[in-house]
Amino acid sequence: MLFGTRTLAEVVSYKIAHSKLPIGGSIIGGPPPDYTHKCAVFQFRAGKAVIRMNGPQWINYDLGEKRKVIYDAKNPLKCIMPNIPYLYGFRRCILPILLLLVWIAIFTSFKPPKSYIKLKLPEKSNHV
């Protein structure tokens, strides 16, 4: 993402994709069910090659709409769309986000309040 080549990709068509749920079986214990979703197909030029990639799930793009794409110049098939829905809109981000929230809650609950830190103890006198 940092050292990739940036270009614009254009929506050229739509595709119905089939996916499985990412975790385990169903309630009955069988295989996880399939679900379908519509995704936009983006096309961009990488040198002499024309690359097509699927857009993010559940986001509607109009035909001809253009979005920024970052790809590896050595292997243009390694490409991403640097936007919030594409990077953080998938189900694998739920667990890290929840763990981050739990860590923040624990960190802030055990951190002493600022009023406690600023409290000064009275100085001792050296009277005998």
Image (tube, rainbow, N blue to C red):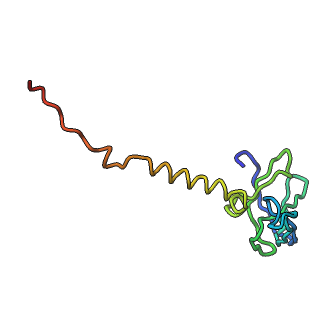
Number of marks: 0
Whole-percent x, y for residue 15 in the image: 87, 70
Residue sitting farthest toward the left: 128
Front residue of this view, candidates 104 and 53 = 104
Residue positioned 80% across, 54% down in the render: 79
Whole-percent x, y for residue 11 in the image: 82, 69
Residue sitting farthest toward the right: 49
Whole-percent x, y for residue 2 in the image: 70, 46
Front residue of this view, candidates 79 and 106 = 106
Please state if 125 lies on the left or on the right of 85 as rendered: left
- When the figure is inspected, residue 117 is found, relative to residue 66, above or below; the finding is above
- When the figure is inspected, residue 120 is found, relative to residue 70, above or below; the finding is above
Please state if 51 lies on the left or on the right of 27 as rendered: right
Residue positioned 76% across, 71% down in the render: 58
Residue positioned 90% across, 58% down in the render: 50
Residue 95 appears in which quarter of the rendering?
bottom right
Front residue of this view, candidates 76 and 15 = 15
Front residue of this view, candidates 118 and 102 = 102
Whole-percent x, y for residue 86 in the image: 73, 61
Question: Quarter holding the C terminus?
Answer: top left
Residue sitting farthest toward the top: 128
Residue 46 appears in which quarter of the rendering?
bottom right
Residue 118 appears in which quarter of the rendering?
top left
Please state if 3 lies on the left or on the right of 97 as rendered: right
